[in-house]
């Protein structure tokens, strides 16, 4: 069976030299975005790595951009590129290898049927109980996915209420199709819980609470005003919409000592291959500061 697993891995595995797809480049950019929000990368480092990622040719090129990062809390986890090679077979060529593979496959089918089969033959599946009609109607789930919209943000906050009973937290980061949320651990005030939303809330990761973490109601903002500024952010920052590589929102407790302590500070970040910038807003959508691409 070990040889069978080895053959399957070689047939489907990816190496550092495997050509990258657009989806691979997008996954790396999401990890880099997460590293920026966590403070692992500066804005300049983030821009340089995103630019390199969008032009990377192989999976090895992409992996080298995140090797020095802590990615356990990243929204995307990459597969290991190391894969075992097909062992050498003395005295035989491809004909012998094919024959051995065929024998192992037949043996695997026989073992599986012996353990789980309920028919007279491992190739006879006519009495499979899973193939019989059961009368159960399909249930279609429709959680919000396009989060950079009025309906998407509203749905995301509603998902928070359903999961946690409120919309409180230390920080909320909203990407176009997923989000991350930091909340206090009610069992231990020294810890905070970090959740990722992708149609539902994943199990949290645990980290130490920072001294400046402060719980606020993350829904206390003018949603329509914020979405409007978000949609015009590329033009505001002088970035062509067609050149945008990433956009995300960050909701934090305000750093303004003159504002009420439960107020929010909202930041919109836009990146491209030619630089990035951000807009800092008050909860009503008024501008605090604009940092143009350098």
Image (cartoon, grey):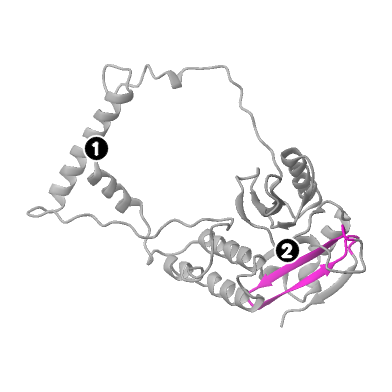
Q: Quadrant of residue 108?
A: top left
Q: Is 273 covered by the magenta stretch?
A: yes
Label the magenta part by its dominant secondary structure: strand
Magenta-tinted stretch:
261-285
- Secondary structure under tag 1 reads helix
Quadrant position of the C terminus in the picture: bottom right
The x, y position of residue 2, in whole percent, is: 24, 44
Mark 1 or 2 closer to N-term? 1
State the residue at coordinates (89%, 63%): 285
Circle on res. 105: 1
Q: Residue furthest bottom?
A: 294
Q: Is 262 covered by the magenta stretch?
A: yes
Disc 1 vs disc 2: which is toward the camera? 2
How crowded pointer 1 is (Cα within 10 Å; few <14, some 14-19, many 20+) is rated as some
The x, y position of residue 77, in whole percent, is: 51, 55
The x, y position of residue 225, in whole percent, is: 88, 59
- Foreground residue among 146 and 280: 280
Work out whether 56 lies above or below 222: below
Circle on res. 211: 2
How crowded pointer 2 is (Cα within 10 Å; few <14, some 14-19, many 20+) is rated as few
- Label 1 vs label 2: CA separation? 58 Å
Residues tagged 1 and 2 counted as in contact (Cβ below 8 A): no
State the residue at coordinates (58%, 74%): 51
State the residue at coordinates (23%, 46%): 3
The x, y position of residue 9, in whole percent, is: 32, 50
Q: Residue furthest left?
A: 91
The reply, left or right, for residue 113 in relation to residue 262 is left
Q: Quadrant of residue 30?
A: bottom right
Circle on res. 67: none
The reply, left or right, for residue 4 in relation to residue 222 is left
């Amino acid at each position: 069976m070990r040889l069978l697993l080895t053959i399957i891995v070689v047939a489907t595995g990816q190496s550092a030299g495997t050509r990258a797809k657009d989806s691979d480049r997008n996954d790396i950019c999401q990890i880099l975005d997460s590293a920026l929000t966590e403070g692992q990368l500066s804005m300049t480092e983030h821009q340089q790595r995103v630019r390199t990622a969008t032009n990377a040719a192989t999976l090895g090129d992409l992996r080298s951009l995140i090797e020095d990062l802590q990615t356990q809390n990243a929204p995307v986890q990459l597969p290991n590129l190391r894969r075992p090679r097909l062992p050498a077979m003395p005295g035989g060529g491809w004909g012998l290898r094919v024959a051995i593979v065929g024998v192992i496959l037949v043996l695997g089918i026989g073992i599986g049927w012996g353990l789980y089969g309920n028919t007279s033959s491992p190739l006879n599946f006519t009495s499979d109980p899973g193939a019989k009609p059961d009368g159960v109607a399909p249930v279609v789930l429709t959680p919000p996915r396009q989060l950079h919209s009025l309906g998407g943000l509203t749905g995301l906050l509603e998902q928070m209420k359903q999961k946690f009973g409120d919309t409180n937290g230390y920080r909320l980061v909203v990407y176009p199709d997923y989000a991350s949320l930091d909340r206090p651990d009610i069992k231990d005030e020294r810890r905070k819980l970090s959740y990722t939303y992708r149609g539902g809330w994943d199990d949290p990761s645990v980290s130490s609470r920072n001294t400046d973490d402060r719980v606020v109601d993350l829904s206390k903002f003018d949603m329509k005003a914020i979405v409007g500024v978000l949609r015009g952010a590329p033009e505001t920052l002088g970035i062509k919409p067609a050149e945008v590589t990433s956009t995300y929102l960050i909701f934090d407790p305000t750093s303004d000592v003159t504002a009420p302590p439960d107020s929010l500070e909202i930041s919109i970040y836009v990146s491209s291959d030619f630089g990035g910038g951000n807009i800092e807003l008050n909860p009503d959508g008024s501008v605090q500061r604009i940092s143009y691409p350098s």
